[in-house]
Amino acid sequence: MLGPEVLDKLLQQYDKNKDGKIQKDEYPRTAEAFANLDRDRNGVLEAADFEAGPARGRRDPRGPEDKDKRPQVGSLAPDFELPLLGSEGKTVKLSSLRGKQPVALIFGSYT
């Protein structure tokens, strides 16, 4: 859970008008990144979005028409191929690791 210290850092960086809230146009990352932080979906990042507790107003960004496409618990991950870090021109395919070793998939930003 993101706490108030995260909001303080974000406010220092992005709250251009110093109103204690971050508007969409003040936040330089994607609309999806903004939506992930805007827990109450009111269009601004503020203290309520960073308080402990269950995510209020959280919804799956995919529509109901995609419900059948969602992976089920215990199902295999969709296969994909990505460049292998530190190996110019080489790639690794997820399915090539199946049954050989544990694999951790980490999605996020390191900026």
Image (cartoon, grey):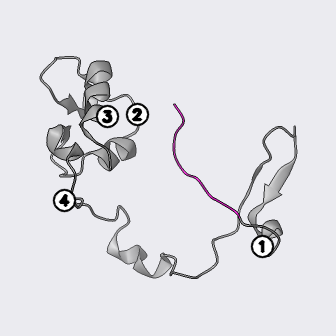
Q: Pointer 3: residues within 10 angstroms few (<14), some, or many (20+)?
A: few
Q: Nearer the viewer, residue 32 or 21?
A: 21
- Helix, strand or loop at disc 4? loop
Label 3 belongs to which residue?
Answer: 6
Q: Is residue 85 magenta?
A: no
Disc on the earlier residue, 3 or 2 = 3
Region rendered in magenta: 103-111
Residue 96 x %, y %: 83, 67
Question: Can you say whether 44 is above or below 56 in the image?
Answer: above
Question: Can you say whether 96 is above or below 70 in the image?
Answer: above
Label 4 belongs to which residue?
Answer: 56
| Callout 2 amino acid | Arg
Give the distance between the C-alpha atoms of the residues marked 4 and 3, in whole angstroms: 18 Å
Give the distance between the C-alpha atoms of the residues marked 1 and 4, in whole angstroms: 37 Å
Residue 87 x %, y %: 87, 40
Give the distance between the C-alpha atoms of the residues marked 1 and 2, in whole angstroms: 34 Å
Disc on the earlier residue, 1 or 4 = 4
Disc on the earlier residue, 4 or 3 = 3
Q: Is residue 58 left or right of residue 83?
A: left
Nearer the observer: mark 3 or 1; the answer is 3
Give the distance between the C-alpha atoms of the residues marked 3 and 1, in whole angstroms: 37 Å
| Callout 3 amino acid | Val
Find residue 29 and name its label.
2
Asked whether the beta carbons under mark 4 and mark 3 sit within 8 Å of each other, the answer is: no
Query: Residue farthest to the left?
Result: 19
| Callout 4 amino acid | Arg
Disc on the earlier residue, 1 or 2 = 2
Find residue 98 and name its label.
1
Q: Pointer 1: residues within 10 angstroms few (<14), some, or many (20+)?
A: few
Give the distance between the C-alpha atoms of the residues marked 3 and 2, in whole angstroms: 16 Å
Q: Is residue 106 magenta?
A: yes
Give the distance between the C-alpha atoms of the residues marked 2 and 4, in whole angstroms: 22 Å
